[in-house]
Image (tube, coloured by chain):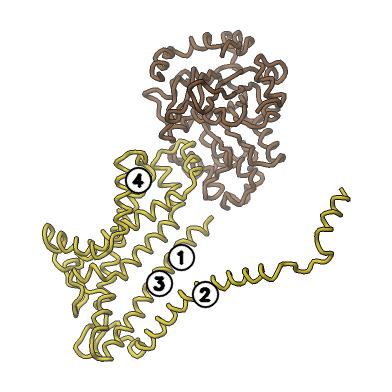
Chain colours: A yellow, B brown
């Protein structure tokens, strides 16, 4: 025993000083600095974007911005109708798509026979839809919701329906992932006590999946909040000087009012646009904070 | 082929008790016949499998399993890895229903009722035949809610009934004294051995007729294992136990009967199929086994 210990010890220097060769140390540092640069590119870009927007728009970040409506005079111009338009559309599409996405994710993940050809086709379709450019949903909405069959026109209802269609596949995929991440031992434990499938899903699987579902859904909602392309086709690119009063109202949304103001010739209007960007970013940060809170809440209990 | 088996095996359990007493030519338990016919409650049979076989897709995982589970006894299933012990035990409360590719052939009777019959409901089966798993799998809830889950899904017990059930079950699982002051804490705050006893308490809370344990101690240290083994002895009078174990010493220590499984490769199969080699009283299996394969396994020359 003691002889082996001596043999091993003799392979090393008697002290514990670092004997790593300089080239190994250099590669270590090179790799680390590469990671640093990659991280900084993202963070700094965002930082300068926000900074330049703030510099352009700080004069208009005040109460008039959110109480005012679009106006031909830049000093009166505000974005209240766009904030309310965005809220109407995003809350509606968020709630509707969360409901549908949850139901279909639960069906596909917990009830459907995953081997069956039909369900594999459905899965493939959903994954494809999640990658379809949003403008395609806009064209679809224009043809079938705004005009054509439904003929809802350029209204809050149309925008909500199209954003629901757009967000739905993403939400289904992320909800399925969240359900899939629930360990099967949890399901087995419930089944082994005589629980029915629905009891197992509703009392064990779903509560365990809530953090994941919330995160995925709020990311989907954030995407809807920032979405502009399909709504350009659906009549949101307009100066609307009143808040929506229902699903048949005219509307505009924040990303499009930003676009409108940014296209104006007058510097003062562009400042309103920059200020609106700040409001939009704050809403997005708020949504993400909400996701974090929900995630931590449901995790903290256990 | 599985269908045909079902038909030929479709006679009632009382005749089976006297007919299927040999497996592969090996006499099962010559001393148990008289006691059964004389109706001694101690040796009453509660479950029986007849020519049980399980396919996963085209793969025959285990075949020709004839087992009898008796009241007041612990039955151990031992054998090398891949011999189908866990597959068998999962048939006994229809947990294999959850695997779409699994097909169960042959028959399993519980108190003379066909477990896989037309009228048998899988939920009802699992309510009566409880299960404890290899890895402790408490629900991500409080200790109290873990134990109360079974009674709650199987009825709507009142608060006081639930309190009583939780206390009784935790006492039976020898966990009450350790957790009575922190019932509302997370089940994950318990140690591994405590978690496994919580899972036993959870299974006992629905007052099953049989308790299946699939390697319940394989994730536990020796002290926690000893506690579970003591617990098994305490409750076996009320809950007959079927235990799968990798640990032969455990089987020898705790069980009254032992079934030894082994694998064999058919000429046309690529993967080995599990078979029941010998089923007898534990002391006989470990002292004078009838089959040379059993002898080789328990003496450590195989597996």
SS label for mark 2:
helix
Q: Quote the CA–CA distance across marks 1 and 2.
A: 27 Å
Q: Quadrant of residue B23?
A: top right
Residues tagged by mark 3 and mark 1 found on one chain of the structure: yes
* Picture disc at residue A292: 1
Q: CA distance from mark 1 to mark 4?
A: 26 Å
- Is residue A13 rendered to the left or right of residue B116? right
Q: Which residue is mark 3?
A: A286
Residue B14 seen from this side: yes
Looking at the image, tell me whether mark 1 or mark 2 is earlier in sequence order.
2
Residue at label 4?
A: A108
Q: Are marks 3 and 1 in contact (CB under 8 Å)?
A: no
Residue in the foreground of this view, choosing between A235 and B162? A235
* Discs 4 and 2 carry the same chain letter: yes
As measured in the structure, the alpha-carbon distance from the residue carrying label 3 to the one carrying label 1 is 10 Å
Query: Which residue is painted at 33% across and 79% down in the image?
Result: A277
Which mark is nearer the camera, 1 or 2? 2
Q: Earlier in the sequence, mark 3 or mark 1?
A: 3
Q: Which of disc 4 and disc 1 is earlier in sequence?
A: 4
Q: Quick check: B172 above or below A252?
A: above
Which residue is painted at 75% across and 68% down in the image? Answer: A18
Can you give x and y, in whole percent of width and height, for residue A161 in the image?
22, 61
Q: Are the residues flagged by discs 1 and 2 in contact, CB closer than 8 Å? A: no
Which comes before the other along the chain, label 4 or label 2? 2
């Amino acid at each position: 025993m003691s002889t082996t210990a001596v043999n091993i010890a003799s392979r090393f220097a008697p002290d514990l000083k670092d004997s790593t060769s300089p080239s190994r140390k250099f590669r270590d540092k090179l790799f680390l600095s590469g990671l640093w640069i990659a991280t900084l590119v993202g963070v700094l870009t965002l930082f300068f974007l926000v900074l330049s927007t703030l510099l352009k728009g700080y004069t208009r970040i005040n109460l008039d911005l959110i109480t005012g409506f679009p106006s031909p005079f830049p000093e009166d111009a505000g974005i209240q109708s766009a904030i309310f338009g965005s809220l109407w559309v995003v809350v509606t599409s968020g709630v509707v798509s969360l409901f549908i996405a949850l139901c279909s994710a639960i069906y596909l993940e917990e009830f459907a026979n995953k081997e069956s050809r039909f369900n594999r086709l459905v899965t493939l379709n959903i994954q494809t839809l999640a990658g379809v450019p949003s403008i395609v949903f806009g064209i679809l909405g224009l043809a079938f919701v705004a005009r054509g069959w439904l003929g809802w026109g350029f209204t809050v209802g149309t925008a909500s329906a199209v954003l629901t269609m757009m967000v739905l596949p993403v939400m289904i995929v992320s909800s399925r992932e969240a359900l899939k991440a629930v360990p099967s031992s949890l399901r087995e434990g419930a089944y082994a006590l005589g629980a029915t499938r629905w009891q197992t899903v509703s009392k064990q699987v779903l509560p365990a999946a809530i953090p994941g579902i919330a995160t995925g859904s709020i990311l989907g909602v954030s995407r809807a909040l920032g979405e502009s392309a399909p709504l350009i086709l659906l009549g949101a690119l307009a100066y609307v000087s009143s808040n929506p009063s229902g699903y048949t109202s005219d509307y505009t949304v924040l990303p499009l009012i930003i676009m409108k103001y940014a296209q104006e010739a007058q510097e003062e209007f562009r400042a309103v646009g920059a200020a609106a960007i700040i409001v939009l970013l704050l809403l997005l940060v708020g949504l993400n904070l909400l996701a974090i809170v929900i995630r931590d809440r449901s995790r903290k209990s256990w | 082929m599985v269908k045909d088996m079902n038909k030929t095996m479709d006679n009632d359990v009382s005749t089976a008790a006297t007919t299927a007493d040999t497996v592969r030519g090996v006499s099962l338990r010559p001393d148990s016949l008289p006691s059964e016919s004389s109706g001694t409650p101690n040796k009453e049979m509660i479950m029986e499998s007849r020519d049980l076989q399980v396919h996963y897709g085209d793969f025959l995982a285990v075949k020709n399993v004839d087992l009898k589970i008796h009241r007041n006894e612990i039955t151990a299933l031992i054998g090398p890895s891949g011999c189908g012990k866990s597959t068998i035990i999962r048939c006994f409360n229809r947990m294999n229903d959850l695997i779409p590719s699994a097909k169960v052939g042959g028959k399993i009777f519980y108190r003379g009722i066909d477990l896989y019959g037309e009228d048998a409901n899988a939920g009802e089966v699992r309510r009566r035949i409880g299960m404890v798993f290899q890895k402790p799998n408490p629900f991500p809830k409080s200790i109290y809610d873990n134990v109360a889950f079974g009674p709650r899904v199987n009825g709507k017990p009142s608060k006081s009934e639930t309190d009583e059930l939780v206390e009784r079950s935790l006492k039976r699982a020898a966990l009450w004294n350790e957790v009575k002051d922190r019932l509302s804490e997370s089940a994950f705050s318990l140690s591994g051995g405590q978690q496994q006893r919580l899972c036993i308490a959870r299974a006992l809370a629905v007052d099953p007729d049989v308790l299946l344990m699939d390697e319940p101690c394989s994730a536990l240290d020796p002290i926690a294992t000893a506690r579970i083994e003591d617990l098994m002895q305490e409750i076996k009078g009320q809950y007959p136990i079927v235990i799968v174990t990798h640990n032969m010493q455990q089987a020898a220590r705790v069980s009254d009967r032992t079934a030894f499984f082994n694998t064999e490769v058919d000429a046309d199969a690529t993967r080995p199929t599990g078979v029941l080699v010998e089923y007898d009283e534990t002391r006989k299996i470990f002292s004078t086994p009838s089959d040379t394969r059993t002898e080789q396994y328990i003496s450590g020359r195989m597996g």
